[in-house]
Image: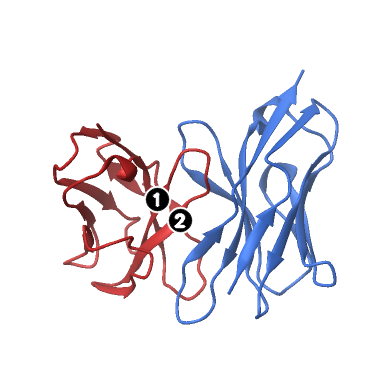
Amino acid sequence: AQSVTQLDSHVSVSEGTPVLLRCNYSSSYSPSLFWYVQHPNKGLQLLLKYTSAATLVKGINGFEAEFKKSETSFHLTKPSAHMSDAAEYFCVVRATYNTDKLIFGTGTRLQVFP
Amino acid sequence: GAGVSQTPSNKVTEKGKYVELRCDPISGHTALYWYRQSLGQGPEFLIYFQGTGAADDSGLPNDRFFAVRPEGSVSTLKIQRTERGDSAVYLCASSLTDREDTQYFGPGTRLTVL
């Protein structure tokens, strides 16, 4: 069965410094992986997705993630944090056997200090 | 164009009551998904429809939960004999098809059972 583990429940950075949000996955198949962001009182928004094409995936708002099969990781990065990046981030894997449901991690809350 | 909409945005009910939550998907999207997000957790899958039929209902917690999508567009999630543990944000998403297309999420309905 597929699953994802987000290694940090909270991450705090200063504005202008790099962001790293860590995610490990477990999957018997070649996984489809996603990062979604959830701002307070707003819906989940797709940041980026990996579906077995290029291992380095670029998303919106300057975020990117690298699929590393040898490490079973899909970490999210951004070179320079902005105050507006403060939100909850979810690493997600798509279940692939007889269903199309998404399996979410427990989330990482990103705080950005001025 | 319009995104996924959900009504009501907030619902407060008493233990034992019946509630209905509505989801309007993006026009033309054939797949529709329901998830539940408890406080401090990632969303958990409940059920998804391809057209009018439930393709996977494995996430429904018990027989008090039921969902319909009679015309292949709007969906209603129905909860009978509500319990305090049902309190959560109920999220709806839609995608163009269920063939690994991106799922677009609505803002959710916050259900509080007193």
- In the image, what residue occupies the spot 33% across and 62% down? B60
**Farthest residue, direction top:** A114
Judging by the rendered image, the residue that carries numbered circle 2 is B44
Q: Nearer the viewer, residue A58 or A105?
A: A105
Residue A70 placed where, x, y %?
Answer: 85, 72
Task: Residue A68: tell me if it is visible.
Answer: yes
Residue A7 placed where, x, y %?
Answer: 73, 49
Q: Is residue A8 above or below residue B102?
A: above
Q: Secondary structure at mark 2?
A: strand
- In the image, what residue occupies the spot 79% across and 25% down? A15
Residue A53 placed where, x, y %?
Answer: 73, 73
Q: Amino acid at mark 2?
A: Glu
Label 1 Cα neighbours within 10 Å, binned few <14 / some 14-19 / many ≥20: many
The answer to which image quadrant residue A48 occupies is bottom right
Q: Are marks 2 and 1 in contact (CB under 8 Å)?
A: yes
Judging by the rendered image, the residue that carries numbered circle 1 is B36
Q: How is the image coloured?
A: by chain
> The chain shown in blue is which?
A
Q: Nearer the viewer, residue A96 or B60?
A: B60
Q: Secondary structure at mark 1?
A: strand
Q: Quadrant of the C terminus of chain B?
A: top left
Report whether A91 appears left or right of B19: right
Q: Nearer the viewer, residue B62 or B58?
A: B62
Label 2: chain?
B
Task: Residue B32: tell me if it is visible.
Answer: no
Label 1: chain?
B
CA gap between label 2 and label 1 equals 5 Å
Report whether A53 appears left or right of B10: right
Residue B75 placed where, x, y %?
Answer: 24, 58
Q: Is residue B109 above or below residue B76?
A: above
What color is chain B drawn in?
Answer: red
